[in-house]
Image (tube, grey):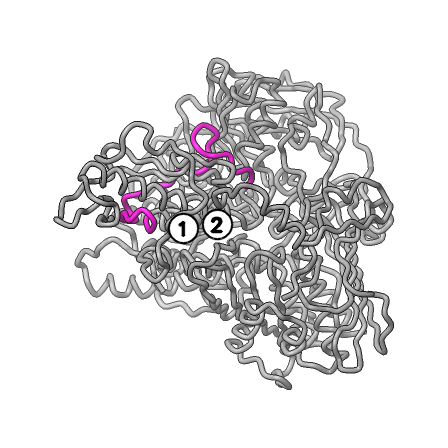
């Protein structure tokens, strides 16, 4: 396709409120890049030493290092497959070490479906180059040409059958060399491990009660801490008489540092009881400051924004016979991890070690060091799995809590476990958003002009500095919350996937970045792409209906990208989509498509829903997805991600909104923040993978969120004849629309 | 001090009588499977079996368990010798983050003990108290069906089986 013009918004967002246009065309950008010396691919560009990725012990044991965090996506298994394939060693002979500031490369955050793209690519190339080095070493020792040697089962084999194992070959700093820009990668046609649905390495422990999570760690002498959080944002602790609490059974210490309050006890339930008693002994001053929930879209539209045109093509104000407008909204939504956040910290001499399920050990280390006012080198963060996070949940805050408490108890490992109401009440939510769309159709039923505007907060308030962490905000000498920044395109934050992938001749896209954050927000799976794709793909259906066109045909008519067309055609065919199809009574079919971030995986989803017209209850009956994520490493792992994306997005789309009054968050548990339960589970979900052998890994963790939402919304409109544009599409809204 | 029967063994427990079973399992007995999810009986992550019934251990105080048999996921099988329900969840690769899975398995186990051949609808109805946030529901239902088949086979044959392998499509 004629690629959308990608704009460097880092230069754009200087002025507040003003509409600033600044283009840097992708071709010109590519020319700039060509002048740079070539860098090795993936995260090797920033961590080029091979031994940062692959370690070979003298006994032949091989360790793969990744700076990314396994958060339930299964990439630990995929990385092991990649390394086994390129190194020519058995899968089981490897082990993978994940994010640890002492042992692994700094790969920033595990986010944006980027783990395969950056870490997977680095491991693939590092493994291939290590194999080349081992072959070269063997060639020298055997006095043979490298070309005559092959590798097999962790050894280099000579034509006469002599074997030199990798463990024998590796010596000294042999692997401490910088990666070359190009690697001799295996021909995908010869893959034996990559492309196979190898069972996940972490599942056996998880289904037999093994220690699998940070919550399961028990260090010698470990004590249990609970934090008493303020009742609302900005609340100040006026009084706290902790004398009685200090005498409760098992209580080791009560810690007060400004508005940060915690209690430590020997046993876990003692700390829970002490936390409750301590909370009852406090008096807080609260300030009402939350917006009116019912007016949320109006509130957002009324806040000051930094506005930038992020895409322009042709003349978007060109007149056409049919023009249509619509507004779509999304509330604040919760990550809703099943396991509340947890961390363990221990101060030994000057060194603070924190075991955490953060997505970013290095940025978190920086934040915690700043909070403790110590050099980052004195702080080590080790990633240990937690409950699935789906973005920036309470993980980083719990890590900071643990460090702040452990500082008061030198030598003692301190485990902090958040309570349910703390996770629900204090996690940074997925931001509320508003989109306004306007488009015109020409006489041939094609979209002649397209206008898209999105209003949103930032989609990342992740640490880096301590000011993003609750403990640092609440302590006596607080660290201010840093000024929010938009995430630059092409990935984008609130404007992620705001630029249409379709080939509209005239188009105009504006990002209204809202700095003020009345509610604590940060990254939630797919960021702005969830709502932007919901909006674009709902609107495409509305336009298709106006053009009297089939929804699938209408999309294909406006799309050149062959890989995008392929997933649309595959999903439609596998679903049994037919032009002019008739649905059974009270049922509807819906279709949606997106390429995540316009640069990652392609995903198309067709859905069938059933609506109860009496109650307004809607049920997803079945969904069929087609996905192109480039070269597939573990097909079942990819299918698992897409199935999960569809069900989680269905839950967001049909049920979920954070609630609040003028002062407090009121959705603080599963009663007040209901999510999908088993009665709403569909009959069938089919995921079809279009594999692209040898093409780059595109990642798959987030590609399904937007298409799943729009596909369900479109099916609902098809079933009822009523279009709902305000998320979530609740039973009551559906019922009201049917009755209207 | 009271005696608590867990996974066929008697344990002397030194904890306050109002301590929820979950904390006794995790803190006193160092068992990992039952998870803290909400402490409110809303999510099922803490589910264990007490006298054959699925119970939310986070809201069941120790004092109610005198003389009862508690079974946790650890009591069903091991990583080397997994029980049918464990094999089934491995073979279906029925986990993403996996945090909810132990609770799901215990509730499913209790169902299969009283209804060896449940329908889809019965499985879904039974699992209503348990939440999964990753969206692994389709696989969980499939794994319960598979466990039912494996249990059926296990009754016919008492020979030892090889360790489970995950499914490869």
Q: Can residue A725 be seen in this view?
A: yes
Q: Which of A323 and B140 is in front in this view?
A: A323
Q: In this view, does A135 lie above or below A434?
A: above
Specify the subunit that label 2 lies on. A
**Count of all numbered marks drawn on residues in the image:** 2
Image quarter of the N terminus of chain A? bottom right
Residue A62, label in figure: none
Question: Picture coordinates of residue A500 (x, y %)?
Answer: 70, 62
Specify the subunit that label 1 lies on. A
Label 1: how many Cα within 10 Å (few below 14, some 14–19, many 20+): many
Task: Confirm or deny contact between disc 1 and disc 2 (CB under 8 A).
Answer: yes
Same-chain status of marks 1 and 2: yes
Label 2: how many Cα within 10 Å (few below 14, some 14–19, many 20+): many
Magenta run includes residue B165: no
Q: Name the residue under label 2.
A: A116
Q: Mark 1 points at which residue?
A: A78
Q: In this view, does A443 lie above or below A301?
A: below
Q: Which of A392 and A159 is in front in this view?
A: A159
Left or right of residue A487: residue B7: left
The quarter of the picture where residue A260 lies is top right
Q: Is residue B110 above or below residue A403?
A: below
The quarter of the picture where residue A134 lies is top left
Magenta run includes residue A107: yes
Left or right of residue A134: residue A301: right
Residue at 57 percent of width and 37 percent of height:
A395
Q: Nearer the viewer, residue A73 or A212?
A: A73
Q: What stretch is highlighted in magenta?
A: A84-109
The quarter of the picture where residue A394 lies is top right
Q: Is residue B21 visible?
A: no
Q: Is mark 2 on a helix, strand or loop?
A: helix
């Amino acid at each position: 396709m004629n690629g959308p013009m990608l704009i460097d918004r880092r230069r754009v967002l200087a002025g507040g409120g003003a509409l600033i246009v600044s283009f840097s065309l992708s071709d010109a950008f590519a020319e700039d890049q060509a002048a740079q010396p070539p860098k090795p691919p993936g995260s090797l560009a920033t961590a080029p030493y091979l031994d940062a990725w692959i370690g070979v012990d003298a006994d032949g044991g091989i360790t793969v290092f990744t700076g990314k965090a396994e958060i339930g996506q299964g990439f630990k298994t995929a990385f092991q497959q990649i390394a086994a394939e390129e190194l020519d060693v058995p899968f089981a002979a490897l082990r993978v070490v994940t994010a640890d500031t002492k042992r692994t490369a700094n790969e920033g955050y595990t986010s944006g479906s980027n783990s395969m793209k950056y870490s997977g690519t680095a491991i693939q190339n590092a493994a291939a180059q290590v194999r080349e080095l081992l072959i070269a070493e063997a060639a020298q020792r055997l006095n043979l040409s490298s070309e005559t040697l092959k590798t097999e089962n962790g050894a280099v084999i000579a034509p006469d059958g002599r074997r030199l194992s990798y463990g024998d070959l590796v010596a000294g700093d042999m692997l401490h060399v910088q990666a070359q820009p190009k690697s001799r990668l295996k021909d995908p046609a010869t893959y034996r491990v990559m492309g196979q649905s190898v069972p996940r390495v972490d599942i056996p422990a998880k289904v037999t009660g093994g220690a699998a999570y940070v919550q399961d760690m028990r260090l010698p002498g470990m004590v249990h801490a609970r934090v008493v959080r303020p009742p609302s944002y900005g609340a100040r602790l006026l009084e706290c008489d902790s004398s009685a609490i200090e005498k409760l059974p098992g209580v080791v210490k009560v810690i007060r540092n400004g508005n940060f309050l915690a209690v430590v006890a020997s046993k876990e339930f003692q700390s829970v009881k002490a936390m409750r008693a301590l909370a009852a002994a406090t008096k807080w001053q609260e300030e009402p400051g939350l917006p009116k929930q019912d007016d949320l879209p109006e509130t957002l539209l009324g806040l000051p924004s930094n506005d930038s045109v992020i895409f322009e093509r042709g003349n978007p104000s060109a007149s056409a016979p049919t023009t249509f407008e619509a507004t779509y909204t999304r509330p604040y939504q919760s990550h809703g991890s099943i396991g509340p956040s947890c961390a363990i910290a221990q101060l030994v001499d000057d060194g603070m070690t924190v075991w955490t399920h953060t997505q970013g050990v290095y940025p978190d280390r920086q934040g915690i060091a700043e909070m403790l006012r110590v050099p980052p080198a004195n702080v080590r963060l080790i990633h240990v799995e937690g409950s699935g996070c789906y973005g920036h949940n309470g993980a980083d805050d719990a890590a900071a809590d643990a460090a702040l408490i452990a500082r008061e108890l030198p030598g003692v490992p301190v485990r902090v476990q958040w309570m349910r109401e703390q996770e629900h009440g204090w996690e940074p939510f997925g931001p509320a958003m508003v989109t306004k769309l306007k488009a015109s159709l020409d006489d041939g039923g094609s979209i002649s002009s397209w206008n898209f505007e999105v209003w949103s907060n930032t989609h990342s308030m992740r640490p880096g500095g301590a000011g993003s962490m609750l403990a640092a905000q609440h302590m006596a000498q607080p660290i201010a919350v840093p000024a929010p920044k938009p995430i630059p395109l092409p990935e984008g934050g609130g404007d992620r996937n705001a630029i249409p992938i379709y080939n509209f001749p005239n188009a105009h896209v504006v990002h209204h970045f809202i700095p003020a954050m009345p509610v604590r927000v940060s990254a939630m799976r797919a960021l702005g792409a969830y709502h932007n794709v919901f909006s674009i793909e709902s609107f495409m259906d509305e336009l298709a209906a106006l053009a009297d066109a089939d929804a699938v045909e209408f999309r294909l008519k406006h799309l050149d990208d062959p890989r995008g067309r392929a997933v649309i055609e595959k999903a439609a065919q596998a679903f049994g989509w037919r032009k002019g199809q008739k649905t059974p009574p009270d049922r509807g079919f819906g279709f949606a498509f997106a390429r995540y971030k316009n640069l990652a995986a392609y995903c198309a989803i067709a859905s069938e829903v059933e609506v109860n017209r009496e109650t307004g209850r809607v049920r997803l009956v079945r969904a069929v997805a087609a996905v192109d994520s480039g070269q597939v490493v573990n097909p079942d792992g990819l299918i698992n991600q897409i199935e999960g994306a569809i069900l989680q997005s269905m839950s967001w789309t049909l049920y979920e909104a954070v609630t609040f009054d003028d002062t407090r968050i009121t959705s603080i548990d599963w009663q007040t923040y209901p999510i999908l339960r088993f009665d709403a589970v569909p009959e069938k979900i089919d995921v079809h993978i279009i594999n692209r052998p040898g093409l780059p890994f595109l990642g798959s963790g987030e590609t399904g969120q937007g298409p799943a939402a729009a596909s369900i919304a479109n099916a609902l409109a098809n079933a009822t004849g009523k279009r709902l544009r305000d998320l979530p599409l609740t039973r009551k809204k559906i019922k009201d629309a049917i009755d209207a | 001090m009271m005696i608590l029967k867990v996974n066929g063994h008697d344990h002397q427990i030194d904890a306050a009588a109002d301590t929820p079973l979950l904390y006794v399992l995790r803190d006193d007995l160092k068992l990992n499977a039952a998870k803290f999810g909400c402490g409110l009986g809303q999510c099922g992550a803490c589910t264990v079996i007490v006298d054959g019934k699925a119970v939310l251990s986070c809201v069941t105080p120790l004092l109610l368990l005198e003389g009862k048999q508690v079974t946790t996921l650890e009591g069903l099988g091991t990583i080397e010798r997994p029980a049918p329900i464990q094999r089934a969840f491995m073979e279906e690769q029925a986990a993403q983050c996996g945090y909810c899975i132990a609770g799901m398995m215990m509730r499913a186990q209790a169902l299969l003990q009283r209804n060896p051949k449940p329908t889809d609808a019965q499985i879904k109805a039974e699992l209503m108290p348990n939440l999964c946030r990753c969206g692994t529901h389709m696989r969980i239902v499939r794994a319960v069906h598979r466990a039912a088949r494996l249990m059926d086979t296990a009754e016919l044959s008492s020979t030892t089986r090889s360790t489970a392998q995950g499914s490869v499509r």
